[in-house]
Image (spheres, rainbow, N blue to C red):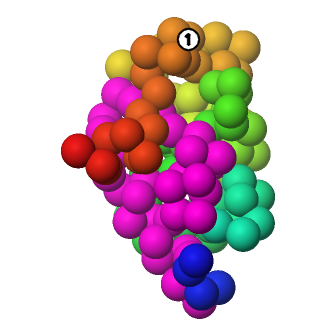
Amino acid sequence: MLEDKDYFAEVYRVVREVPVGRVTTYGAIARYLSLRAGARMVGWAMVASHGHDVPAHRVVNRIGVLSGKHFFGSPTAMQELLEAEGVQVEDDRVVDFQTRLWDPSVELAL
């Protein structure tokens, strides 16, 4: 279990591993890191990530919705960043979400 002081840095480390053109979820990161507060804690880390060179736009909710879009510079910035990486978004949701999903428990265990 991570100490509270370390969880932001560990979340950022995992998010930096998400490849261009892929997305992960708050919950997948939380499970990988065994975080007590789970997905909510990852969300807090993403809100605080601006200025830390973290591709926070690649983190979505468990069904592929851009639930963190309100924390970017504009209501469309998160979608624009994803689309620039080849991720199609419709109605604030990642198209072909299961194909685009990157799970750190699988990918980082290799």
Residue 74 shown left or right of residue 12 in the figure:
right
**Quarter of the image where the N terminus is located:** bottom right
- Measured along the vertical axis of the image, is residue 107 above or below residue 85? below
Residue 51 shown left or right of residue 36 in the figure:
left
Residue 41 in percent (x, y) is at 71, 65
Which residue is found at the position 41% from the left and 46% from the top? 104
Q: Is residue 76 magenta?
A: no
Q: Is residue 105 visible?
A: yes
Image quadrant where residue 87 sits? top left
Residue 53 in percent (x, y) is at 38, 64
Q: Residue furthest left?
A: 110
Which residue is found at the position 74% from the left and 38% from the top? 67
Q: Amino acid at mark 1?
A: Val
Which residue is found at the position 57% from the left and 29% from the top? 79
Q: Is residue 74 visible?
A: no
**Which secondary structure is most common in the magenta stretch?**
helix
Residue 59 in percent (x, y) is at 55, 43
52 or 76, which lies in front?
Answer: 52
Residue 84 shown left or right of residue 3 in the figure:
left
- Measured along the vertical axis of the image, is residue 39 above or below residue 4? above
The range drawn in magenta is: 5-34
Residue 48 in percent (x, y) is at 63, 70
Q: Mark 1 sits on what residue?
A: 95
